[in-house]
Amino acid sequence: MRDHGVATHSAPEAVKPTPLAGRRTRLESALLVCGILAALLYVAMNIFIPRLWPGYSIAAQAISELSAIGAPTRPVWVPLGVLYTLLVTAFGWGLWRSAHDRRALQIAGALVVFQGVFGLFWPPMHLRGGPFTLTDTLHIVWTAVTLLLTLLVMGCAAAALGKRFRLYSIATVAVWLVFGTLTSLDAPRIAANLPTPLMGLWERIN
C-alpha cells in the first residue's frame, strides 16, 4: 500500500511543468501570434498606403510600385515593410521552437526565418517608365527566391500538419499558380510603361 501511495503521489510531480517550461510556452505563443499580426499589417498596408498616392490604382498597379524609387508612398511603406518582415521572422522562430520533434515543421520555421531576413534586403524597383537598372533585376531575383521559399515552406508544413492542411496547401498553390501566371504576364509591361489593367488585382489575390 505504501508503494502504491508513493506512485500515486509522485505521478503529478513528474508531469508538473517547470516555470521555465511555462515561459517557453508563452514565448512560443507570442512568436506565433506575430504571424497573425504580420498578415493583418500587410493587409492594412495594402488598403491604406495606396490612398496616400493620388492616382494609384490597386487594381492596375503592382504592390512593389508602392515602395519603388521615387514613389510618394515609399517613405511610409519601407518602415512598415521592415516591421512586417520582422514579424514574419519572429513567426518563423516561433514555428521552429514549437515544432519539437517534427522535422518538417522545423525546416518550415527555419525557412520562414531565412525568408524574413532575406526580405530585409529587398532591392527596390523604379517607377514605371524609368530606367531598368541592376536594382530592378535584383528586385525580380528577390521575388523569385521568395516565391520558391514560400512554396518550400508550404510543402514542409503540409507534410507535418496532416490531411486538412495538405488540402488547404494544394488549393493555395493552385490559386497561386493561376494568378501568379497572370501577374507575371503583365510584369514586362511595367518597365515599358504600358497599361496593366488587372495586374494589381491578380497580385493581391496571390
Image (tube, helix red, strand yellow):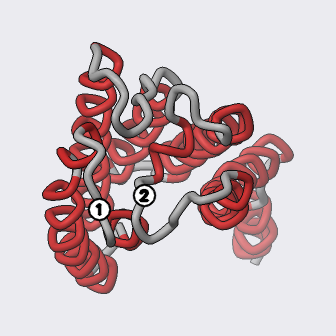
Position in image of residue 165 (x %, y %): 33, 78
Q: Residue at x 55, y 45 (%)?
A: 66
Position in image of residue 152 (x %, y %): 23, 49
Q: Which residue is mark 2?
A: 61
Res. 33 in view? no
Q: Residue at the right extreme?
A: 19
Q: Quadrant of the C terminus?
A: bottom left
Q: Residue at the top extreme?
A: 134
Circle on res. 196: 1
Quarter of the image where one finds residue 200: bottom left
**Mark 2–mark 1 distance (CA, rounded to whole Å):** 7 Å
* Label 2: element kind: loop
Mark 2 Cα-neighbour bin, 10 Å: few <14, some 14–19, many ≥20: many
Q: Is residue 47 left or right of residue 58?
A: right
Which comes sooner in the sequence, label 2 or label 1?
2
- Do tag 2 and tag 1 residues touch (Cβ < 8 Å)? yes
Q: Residue at x 59, y 59 (%)?
A: 55
Mark 1 Cα-neighbour bin, 10 Å: few <14, some 14–19, many ≥20: some
- Viewer-proximal residue among 172 and 199: 199
Q: Residue at x 38, y 44 (%)?
A: 106
Res. 40 in view? yes
* Label 1: element kind: loop
- Viewer-proximal residue among 6 and 170: 170
